Amino acid sequence: MFLKKISSFIIVLLISSSVFSQEKFTLSGSITDSKSNETLIGVNLYIPELNATVSTNQYGFYSITLVEGKYTVLASYLGYETISSQLTLNESKKLNFALAPSGELLNEVIIKDGNKSTNIRSTEMSINKLSISSIKKMPVVLGEVDVIKSLLLLPGVTNAGEGASGFNVRGGGADQNLILLDEATIFNSSHVFGFFSVFNPDAIKDLKLYKGGIPANFGGRASSVLDIYQKDGNSKSFHANGGIGLVSSRLLLEGPIVKDKGSFLIAGRGSYAHLFLKLSEENKNNTAYFYDLNAKLSYKLNPNNNLYFSGYFGRDVFSISESFSNTYGNTTFNLRWNHLFSDKLFSNFSMIYSDYYYGLDLNFIGFNWSSGIKNYNIKYDFKNYISDDFKLSYGANAIYYSFNPGTIKPTDSNSGINADQLDKKYAFEPSVYISAEHDISKKIALTYGLRYSMFYRLGQSTVNLYENNNPVTFNTDQQIYEKATPIGTTFYGKNKTLKSFGNFEPRLAVSYKLDDNTAIKASYNRMTQYLQLISNTSSPTPLDIWMPSDQYIKPQIADQVAFGYFKNFKDNMYSLEVETYYKKVQNRLDYIDGADLIANDAIEQVILNGRMRSYGLEVMLRKNEGRLNGWISYTLSKSEQQTPGRTAEESGINNGKWYRSIYDKTHNLAVTGSYKQNEKWTFGANFALQTGQPVTYPTGQYSYLGLVIPSYGLRNANRLPTYHHLDVSATLTPRNNEGRKWKGEWVFSIYNVYNRKNAASINFSQNTETGVNEAVKTSIFGMVPAVSYNFKF
């Protein structure tokens, strides 16, 4: 019934569009880079006669409907020369633009923010876009350009500590972020346990982080969406670029399959720091390295049809002698078809595969362990450019999940370990959505939509049954939670539904333009997350397990409201963004004290359903033009969690009161800048300061059978010391690059200039010599100088 209503609504809108478009004509087309034919995302087309603007979508397509007349069309994109075209619109026309890069050295396709100044007219808020050229100028640890580390300089985004994987958005967990690479889900975004991200910057075309005001086509996570697209490849001529650094190197090759119609791209990256371990007698049998591969094929069948096939494969390998070996990583594939039904109706059909694998070989014990998650995703999206003031997006999505919580196999016949397979789990998540972009007047713009998601937890699986349906009991005498004893089991056959859910997820955003340079905006979105990451660490680790919602694990439901003030100054040279937000999350997992999460086939016995809330104020001041550009961002925020008792007799966690979540960072300040002194030298600097991460310290100790056992206070009642560091870089572009096919640059950087020993953790132990209790701080990085060489030909 719901689908029929949506279909009827769409048909009415399509019919009405033909009525309202009388005596109007549609101008449409695509915008590409003139040197590579790479489609450009977010290019602004401005028509001064009507003061009208339209932007290209994520596939480089635009469409605008205008009354008959003569117009000037300006196509502008930072990093590219602006094109002006005169035309007489007396019929619907296709007009493609090829923009010429303005000439930076190593970025033939210079993907900027579209327009770095705040888009006053748009309803977009709580959204950050970063250019790849800007990211490459930021100094980072060990000289390795890193997409995820660059996000940490944005307001509302923090990390879980130095060397920690993932990122936290507006007080949410790293598992609450949906990370997409060419529409495929990336379940672990880190290499080397968080030191590097899995994204090769050379292969990336565009990235956008949604912290709030999330469009209706996205779902499945409670906190944010990081949407990343790979380059399509150069369909005009062959090119290569790459870099050589202290710990890793990279190489990208791209070129035409059929000139101006088809292209390929392949990019590889690998680390070799483990080779230095071989020089040490103590570590010659140890190793730690990563590698990844990006690939993409693009082909234009005709003006209305394009095919794309993209993939990613990455692995981390870590081993100690021959006794321990750890391998993990992501694999993704996406076959995509863009089809233009008409100059007003654009569609994209995708078939996507995503796999995260974790393997652990423990030869000294005699077994290996493997786990992972796979999903198979089909999605069909449409965008209907009904009029200049009204655009409609709609589509459907279906994801099938396969979860492997753990497989144990003995390594040989002498092993004392028996083979075991934790119950594999399966789930199906279909969804539909519809969303409208509606310009009510010259001052008011709306984006509103509705997503309806469903989730089916499927067999084949054996499910434990408990008295009163409670897998966790409360011991009133000792005031602790304990595992309940199952009173029976039920087996569900293949594809039988164990539990089903359905949720409406409304979305709304509004912008009110006070004047040409000032706007106030507001947004609301509800997100439902049906997957839960089973982890009690502050940041995701490869050993963490994804679990589907079922009769014991409820889906997280997040509601977020945000309000913002946006201002441009001095002809867009400066821009100011101020936002405040409030977010609450139902059914956030919490754990009983002493929870055993690894290889637990009855995980419901150690988890509790709690709730979260976070709220804050974000300020971002940017300088967009000139030799010196960059931004200052500051966030004042609070993130809390509560797990009250289910009955009056239960104490809950922390006596049922709100307590700091491990993602709570009261203050978060970031300053980043880039200064181009001349054509030869460019300098960059970052400064980051964050309130220390909440932790739980012991408050005392007691002796039991000769053992000294610490006793702990309330959860997250303490904090690590304040985290801060300053990084600098200098980029040297040799003058002899001019006129040469081979072009290069040297990047010199120093991470943590003043050698701040930031605490990754603090461990409490008893000194074996003095017998005195002591706190030992663990730091990962001090000052780290680095040099790398980037090239292209």
Image: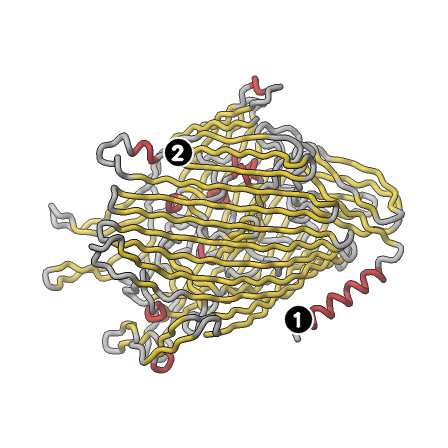
State the separation of the CA atoms marked 1 and 2: 53 Å
Location of mark 2 (residue): 247
Q: Which mark is residue 3?
A: 1
**Residue at image coords 27%, 53%:** 411
Q: Is mark 1 on a helix, strand or loop?
A: helix
- Which of pointers 1 and 2 indicates the residue nearer the eye? 1
Which quadrant holds the N terminus? bottom right
Along the line of sight, which residue is nearer the eye, 105 or 516? Answer: 105
**Residue at image coords 55%, 72%:** 502
Along the line of sight, which residue is nearer the eye, 681 or 236? Answer: 236
Q: Where is residue 450 in the image (x, y as percent from the top left)?
A: 63, 66
Q: Is residue 70 left or right of residue 693?
A: right
Nearer-N-terminus badge (1/2):
1
Q: Which three-letter amino acid code belongs to the residue tagged 1?
A: Leu
Q: Is mark 2 on a helix, strand or loop?
A: loop
Please determine whether, in this image, residue 39 is positioned above or below residue 473: above
